[in-house]
Amino acid sequence: MIAQLSKLVKKVGEQQKELILEFSQQLNQHNELIEKAMEKQERMEQKINRIETRLMDKEIYHYKENQEKVQQRKQSEIQRRRQREDERKHSEQMHNQYQQQMQQQQNQSQQESQIKRKDLQIQVEDEKEQEHDQQQQLEVNHQDHLPVQEHEEDGFESCDEDDSHRVYEKTGDPLEDYYLQINTIKVKENRKYIREGMVAMHELMELIKPDGWLFEKTYNKVDLYVREGNKTLVAFRGEARFDYPPDVVIEFLRNIDLRVMWDGQNFESINKVKDFGMETYIYYVRLKQQWPLGNRDLLLLFQGWQSEDGTIYLASKLTQHPDHPEIPKIIRVDTRSGSYAIEPLNEGKCCKMTYITEFDFRGSIPRYIIQKAGQASYIDSMGKLRKLLDKLHPDQKYNP
């Protein structure tokens, strides 16, 4: 009986060892599969990064090549202007010399004629007649001087006042004082759109305040906020820090060639179509069509201003212009705001960019889906902007 039990226990122990060995083999196989999957994923990520790097390098090469061509055209144009200016100055100089020669000849002939007349008078007139003539000449000279004296006594009453140089009193508000320059704009249409941009700038000044914004999350060095109580518009706020001066970062917003290199995934085309002065422009933007969305475009009025503390504001909103009406079968996005504020930090060595957007995408897709997609696209664009800054301006990066 005891021998049978020991055999049974021994058999059970062997079965357990076999099960443990089999389980260990399966676990090793599973770990090997996991390691292979992770290696494959890592290779895919490396391949994607290499592709993105090659594409960005290619875009940077084309951008630099285009910039060199632009600089060459500018230099050629400057040389042509200088040549035309030199020719104009030479022509004016020759003309002035000719006029001087003619004037000298005329004066010389007049002097000769006067001398001849005087000699004849001396010959035919006696001393008495000469004295009489001198007295008459003195009287004539005295009469000639009378109107001059009357004019001098008249002062400035005979002068018409030019009221085109009116002086407008400053208010003490830097932004309001900046807009006093609008009185120097002569074109009525330009004044209209500058005032419209002024409204967008004042709206940005209100939106930039922290009131009414709720913190949502931080992702890839970008802080996201949502509009409190908003249920109708796609609205969010993003804040990101860049280790570059504000004037370097703002160039990547204003320069269209640079803009499409980090934000081009959203645009089919973007063009500046109007320039009204005082940093006020109109841009026409065609968005890339993505299923299931229809074709969409934007007509945006931009206006820029720099405050005394160095913060650069770039306000934008939807506008209308007779040269760019809405196109049939293309939905125009109702953009209430798509604005930026770039605040200098560490004595201007780096900066904080704040982006605020409020818009109605117009369509049947739920608002929250559009908002999440917009936030994801914005975060992706900020990452590409950092990479592009590092590639084009490594010497200006702030390293604390």
Image (spheres, rainbow, N blue to C red):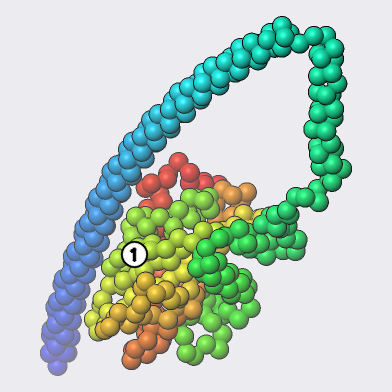
Q: Nearer the viewer, residue 266 or 210?
A: 266
Q: Residue at x 49, y 90 (%)?
A: 231
Q: How many marks?
A: 1
Residue 177 place in picture, x, y as percent = 68, 61
Q: Is residue 53 above or below residue 273?
A: above
Q: Residue at x 33, y 36 (%)?
A: 76
Q: Residue at x 42, y 63 (%)?
A: 274
Q: Amino acid at mark 1?
A: Ile
On the image, which quarter does residue 299 sit in?
A: bottom left
Identify the residue position indicated by label 1 in the image: 270
Q: Is residue 2 above or below residue 154?
A: below
Secondary structure beneath dot 1 equals strand
In this picture, residue 339 sits left or right of residue 23: right
Q: Residue at x 63, y 78 (%)?
A: 211
Residue 202 place in picture, x, y as percent = 61, 72
Q: Residue furthest top?
A: 123
In this picture, residue 87 sits left or right of residue 250: left
Q: Is residue 154 above or below residue 374?
A: above
Residue 277 place in picture, x, y as percent = 51, 58
Q: Nearer the viewer, residue 69 or 214?
A: 69
Q: Is residue 282 above or below residue 18?
A: above
Q: Nearer the viewer, residue 35 or 220?
A: 220
Residues packed near mark 1 inside 10 Å, few (<14), some (14 to 19) or many (20 plus): some
Quadrant in which the N terminus appears: bottom left
**Residue 387 in view here:** no
Residue 24 place in picture, x, y as percent = 19, 73
In this picture, residue 150 sits left or right of residue 208: right
In this picture, residue 184 sits left or right of residue 329: right
On the image, which quarter does residue 78 sit in?
A: top left
**Residue 226 in view here:** yes
